[in-house]
Image (cartoon, rainbow, N blue to C red):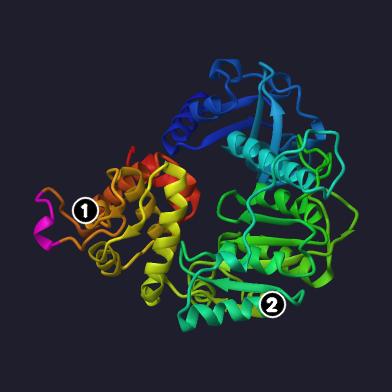
Amino acid sequence: MKAKEYLAILQKTSEVLGEAIHIVDAEGRTIVYNDAMARLEKISVEDVLGKPFREVFPHIPQEESTLYRALAKGEASASEPQTYLNVYGKAITTVNSTVPVEVDGKIIAAIEVAKDITEIKNMSDTILGLQEESLVSAGKVDSKKELKPAIKRYTFDSLIGTTSEFAKAIGIARKASGTDASVFIYGETGTGKELFAQSIHYDGSRKNNPFLAQNCAALPAALLEGILFGTSKGGFTGAVDRAGLFEQANGGTLLLDEISAMPYELQSKLLRVLQEDYIRRVGGSSDIPVDVRIIATVNERPEKLIERGTLRKDLYYRLNIVNINIPPLRERKEDIPLLAEIFLKNHNVRYGKELWMISDRALKKLDEYDYPGNVRELENIIMSAVSLADNEHVLNEKDVNTGSGYHQPPQRISDFHENESSLSQYMERIEKTVIRRHLLDNEGNVSKTAKELGMLRQNLQYKIKKYDL
């Protein structure tokens, strides 16, 4: 078989795989460049194939190019972020894995597989920028920028409930606010974990210092590390000097929501920071001391997360100095009338209604529901009822809709379609239906839908693409 035929096979294989692939020969000339990579870099395949990659991408400093390092030095790189300009001057951010191809001790090619994270990178920059602005507005840092309104703060007055287990959780949280110990909070989605975290912070000695929060499931590992620890110019292609959340929260509290979604290797780096009380920016060489209190949350039982291998046992023990378990709403239904009245009052004002009370029948209907979305779902139900209620003074049973589609009834065997020849096809149909309904409920918001479904945002995006939703 001729070399030209081999290349044609490689090019077609790269198209079938669907990943963004770029392969160069020993001289740096592109021999494979598929459509997925062309779409990622906003350039045509014809503009790259057969040309030296340094000529096509002159804006990437040579020593920072993963392809160059693979060819010239035999260096492999895994999930390395790069921000660079394509031939048209458009900024692209990717996460690249690059490997040299060696035969008889000689490097004959380099293969690069890339993933486009331009939008996610822009989002992460926005996150850090907004965090900085919130610190400016709170007077924590100096700036000539116009002051912005401070974010909403929650205190122990925001925690509503009288049942014994909920009162116990509040009692532990109050004691925790008097210390600097790390706190580990377990609670299902919608139980109010951030309310507890903010209450601890704003009732303690750090209340006049920053409170920052980061959802660990919202960003890929390559960007999450930079968000937490900051970046140094030259650390990777396109990197700039930027303080991370640990530096921004110095002297205050950092809430790490869904910490089990943090990649395992990054959990190890976090553990070292907690032990040593200093961070090193991504690509940096100097250690920066930090004084940050960590509050971590999970929405599954930690022992299950440890057993599954998504939460490091040593990190859990390091964080679990103070342990708080927030009971789900179905285990404290005595609190439903009180919570419902408060939500009624709040959303009355919001929607300009004059609803004075909730009828007994409506309360009974609320009591009979099991609330997989917990307190957050109860508030959504009341908010919907208030917004759609007639101009009466009583919120009635007909106004309260607990059949939101969130909690789907079990499917019957008779629902199995005749053209579904396997259980996996049947389960995929159910999964597609559930994801579609949640996306519709959340108006297409992927992050919110992923959180409700208890899955990583990246996994949900894969499912959306798979089912063409």
Q: Nearer the viewer, residue 190 or 444?
A: 190
Q: Position of residue 190 (x, y in %)?
A: 46, 62
Q: Amino acid at mark 1?
A: Lys
Relative to 224, say whether 179 is above or below.
Answer: below
Q: Secondary structure at mark 2?
A: helix
> Which picture quadrant has residue 74?
top right
Q: Earlier in the sequence, mark 1 or mark 2?
A: 2
Residue 103 in view (yes/no): no
Circles 1 and 2 in contact, beta carbons < 8 Å: no
User: Residue drawn at (38%, 44%), measured in percent from left and top?
Assistant: 353
Q: Amino acid at mark 2?
A: Ala
Q: Position of residue 232 (x, y in %)?
A: 83, 44
Residue at the extreme right: 286
User: Image quadrant for the C terminus?
Assistant: top left
Q: Nearer the viewer, residue 286 or 193?
A: 193
Is residue 415 rendered magenta in the image?
Answer: yes
Question: How crowded is the residue under tag 2: few (<14 C-alpha within 10 Å), some, or many (20+)?
Answer: many
In the drawing, does residue 376 fall left or right of residue 173? left
Q: Position of residue 109 (x, y in %)?
A: 65, 36
Which residue lies under the disc numbered 1?
Answer: 398
User: Residue drawn at (59%, 67%), measured in percent from left and top?
Assistant: 157
Q: Nearer the viewer, residue 285 or 152?
A: 152
Which residue lies under the disc numbered 2?
Answer: 176
Q: Position of residue 27 (x, y in %)?
A: 72, 27
Q: Secondary structure at mark 1?
A: helix
Relative to 299, say whether 388 is above or below.
Answer: above
Residue 307 in view (yes/no): yes
In this rendering, the count of numbered labels is 2
Give the magenta-colored segment's residue range: 412-418
In the drawing, does residue 170 fall left or right of residue 177? left
User: Residue drawn at (42%, 49%), measured in percent from left and top?
Assistant: 348
Is residue 296 rendered magenta in the image?
Answer: no
